[in-house]
Amino acid sequence: MQLIEEILEQKVRPTLRAHNGDVELLEITPEGIVKVKLTGACSTCPGARQTISEIVEAALKEACPEIKGVVPVFQVSDELLNEAIKIIRKSKSI
């Protein structure tokens, strides 16, 4: 896990940060799948899947041939969920 973090820090994050984004390492499965979450501007970018494959996955596979793939995990924050619930409740009371 430490090697993956180092690769992300040295090869991936500088590119993502240049676009006001970042990546968070969530998990490495026993099968060699790396699960990541894009954050910042990258999390809502229409090219997020391309960023995963062309930047994140390419860098990790180059440095660690045992990595079989990179999978994005899209999560919604609790804050966003709570705001959505407030809007729904408000519209039902109208």
Image (cartoon, rainbow, N blue to C red):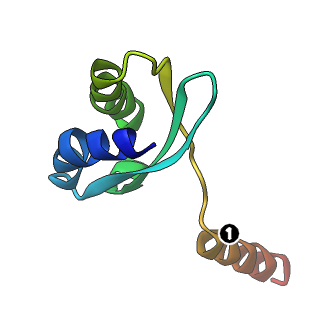
The location of residue 31, given as percent across then percent down, is 62, 21
Residue found at the far right of this picture: 93
The front one of 77 and 35 is: 35
Going by the numbered disc 1, the residue's amino acid type is: Leu
Q: Residue 46, can we see it?
A: no
The front one of 32 and 23 is: 32
Dot 1: few (<14), some (14–19), or many (≥20) neighbours within 10 Å? few
The location of residue 84, given as percent across then percent down, is 68, 71
Q: Residue 81, can we see it?
A: yes
Which residue is drawn at the image coordinates 21% and 55% (left, top)? Answer: 17
The location of residue 7, given as percent across then percent down, is 28, 39
Which residue is drawn at the image coordinates 61% and 59% (left, top)? Answer: 76
Q: Which residue is mark 1?
A: 81
Q: Is residue 78 above or below residue 61?
A: below
Q: Is residue 66 above or below residue 45?
A: above
The front one of 45 and 3 is: 3
The C terminus sits in image quarter: bottom right
Which residue is drawn at the image coordinates 38% and 15% (left, top)? Answer: 65
Residue 85's quadrant in the figure? bottom right
Q: Secondary structure at mark 1?
A: helix
Which residue is drawn at the image coordinates 29% and 45% (left, top)? Answer: 6
Relative horizontal placement of residue 52, taking residue 32 as reference (left or right) = left
Relative horizontal placement of residue 49, taking residue 28 as reference (left or right) = left
Q: How many marks?
A: 1
The location of residue 41, given as percent across then percent down, is 32, 56
Residue 4's quadrant in the figure? top left
